[in-house]
Image (spheres, rainbow, N blue to C red):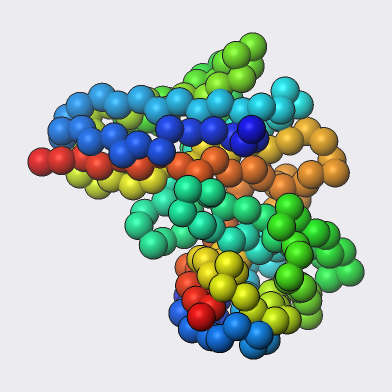
Amino acid sequence: RKEVEQDPGPFNVPEGATVAFNCTYSNSASQSFFWYRQDCRKEPKLLMSVYSSGNEDGRFTAQLNRASQYISLLIRDSKLSDSATYLCVVKLMDTGRRALTFGSGTRLQVQP
Amino acid sequence: DADVTQTPRNRITKTGKRIMLECSQTKGHDRMYWYRQDPGLGLRLIYYSFDVKDINKGEISDGYSVSRQAQAKFSLSLESAIPNQTALYFCAIGTGGGNEQFFGPGTRLTVL
């Protein structure tokens, strides 16, 4: 089983739509959670951190459910420029693994 | 200028050749990482370094070696390249908090 699992998509949505992605993680010792964005053939970049109480950044809302071990990302009023792959990222509390674990990503295509 | 640079950006080589990928940064961060990205598998950690004298294996270090020549430079070597090392390689840097990583533009390596 992968440590971080995501639906690969693609999610094809029209401009203005609301779309949500989920991600599940297997290690209950996971400490920190993030969403990164990766454009085609480009490097990943941090989109937002995910806090236990949920957090919002403009059109983007991230939520964490520790009991069920999943993270979600909601994008409202989708723009063409939101087309990208969204990577779910988890950081373990175990100090022997002092790095981030990346999901394989969910591809979003926003259509005019 | 970019915070993290990688050279070369593209490389085609033959099985058995020795290859070195170089990474340099201008942000002064202590932590540096090498990842490879394959379709459907996401980013996987090869090696990481928390300072010049601290080198650690990641989840897929076999067939690779690294050198941290200075705080700003971290090189990845393939001693004898094989076709299944064909991938997109990213260097990343991070701070002591370890929550955000900044990625270089990537090196696309093809081993024939």
Q: Position of residue B76 (x, y in %)?
A: 69, 74
Closer to us: B15 or B108: B15
Point out the residue furthest to the top here: A67
Looking at the rendering, in which quadrant would you find the C terminus of chain A? top left
In the rendered image, the vertical position of residue A110 relative to residue A23, given as above or below: below
Point out the residue furthest to the left here: A112
Residue at horizontal 56%, vertical 86%?
B14
In the rendered image, the vertical position of residue A26 relative to residue B65, given as above or below: above
Q: Position of residue B16 (x, y in %)?
A: 66, 85
Q: Please give left or right for residue A4 compared with residue A14 in the image.
A: right
In the rendered image, the vertical position of residue B85 relative to residue B8, given as above or below: above
Q: Position of residue A72 (x, y in %)?
A: 46, 24
Q: Is residue B31 visible?
A: no
Looking at the rendering, in which quadrant would you find the N terminus of chain A? top right
Residue at horizontal 43%, vertical 32%?
A7
Closer to us: B10 or A80: B10
Q: Please give left or right for residue B63 compared with residue B10 in the image.
A: right
For residue A10, which quarter of the picture?
top left
Q: Position of residue B27 (x, y in %)?
A: 63, 66
Q: Is residue B10 visible?
A: yes
Closer to us: A92 or B61: B61
Residue at horizontal 32%, vertical 29%?
A75
Q: Please give left or right for residue B22 compared with residue B61 in the image.
A: left
Residue at horizontal 61%, vertical 47%?
B100
